[in-house]
Amino acid sequence: MTDYPDYGATEDRTLPAVCYGLYLLAFATGVTGIIGLILAYANRGEASPSMQSHYAFLIRTFWMGFVWMLLSGMVLGVGLPLSFIVIGIPLLILAKIMFALGAVWYGLRCVVGVIYLSRGEAYPRPYAFLV
């Protein structure tokens, strides 16, 4: 008889890699992160424990980044009307710094996740706030 390869023996790292790619592509498009989030939610239940850690990390990265950007937008929303009477300018600067730090944090988490994924390792701390 012919031996067929056991496709279940290796972990499928393709879908987490696609999710990471969509998250990074969100810097240019702004919406592909949502598609990556949907893919992460849809595939985490049937993934191996190693890949489940990546999906948990991806989902948590999206939601923490979303909350951070929402807070940054609120600071911007308060600072913009107040900038017409000059007292809102520090809030505009703070909002810009918050957006920049959030983008660096988001990108760094995605790159570190890709590094662990390329090694075939589970993400060691998927529920940590920092990298």
Image (cartoon, rainbow, N blue to C red):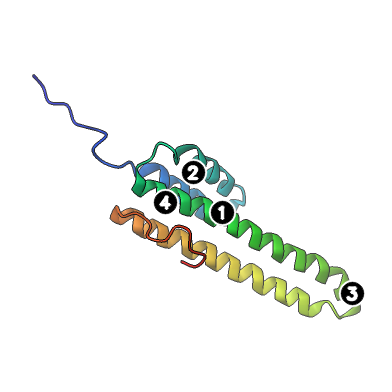
Residue 104 lies, with reference to residue 127, above or below; the image says below
Query: Which disc, if any, is residue 84?
Result: 3
Quarter of the image for residue 119 reads bottom left
Whichever of callouts 2 and 4 sits on the residue coming sooner in the sequence is 2
Quick one: 62 or 93, which is closer to the camera? 62
Question: Does the residue at mark 2 contact the one at mark 4 (Cβ under 8 Å)?
Answer: no
Query: Which disc, if any, is residue 40?
Result: 2
Query: Which disc, if any, is residue 62?
Result: 1
x and y percentages locating residue 56 in the rendered image? 47, 50
Q: At label 4, which amino acid type do we have?
A: His
Residue labelled with disc 4: 54
Question: Does the residue at mark 1 contact the one at mark 3 (Cβ under 8 Å)?
Answer: no
Left or right position of 96 against 44: right
Q: At label 1, which amino acid type do we have?
A: Phe
Whichever of callouts 1 and 4 sits on the residue coming sooner in the sequence is 4
Distance, label 1 to label 4, CA atoms, is 12 Å
x and y percentages locating residue 98 in the rendered image? 65, 71
Question: Does the residue at mark 1 contact the one at mark 2 (Cβ under 8 Å)?
Answer: yes
Which residue occupies 44% across, 38% down? 45
Residue found farthest to the top: 1
Residue found farthest to the right: 85
Whichever of callouts 1 and 3 sits on the residue coming sooner in the sequence is 1
Query: Which disc, if any, is residue 8?
Result: none
Whichever of callouts 4 and 3 sits on the residue coming sooner in the sequence is 4
Q: Secondary structure at mark 4?
A: helix
Left or right position of 9 against 12: left
Distance, label 2 to label 3, CA atoms, is 43 Å
Q: At label 3, which amino acid type do we have?
A: Phe
Q: Secondary structure at mark 3?
A: helix
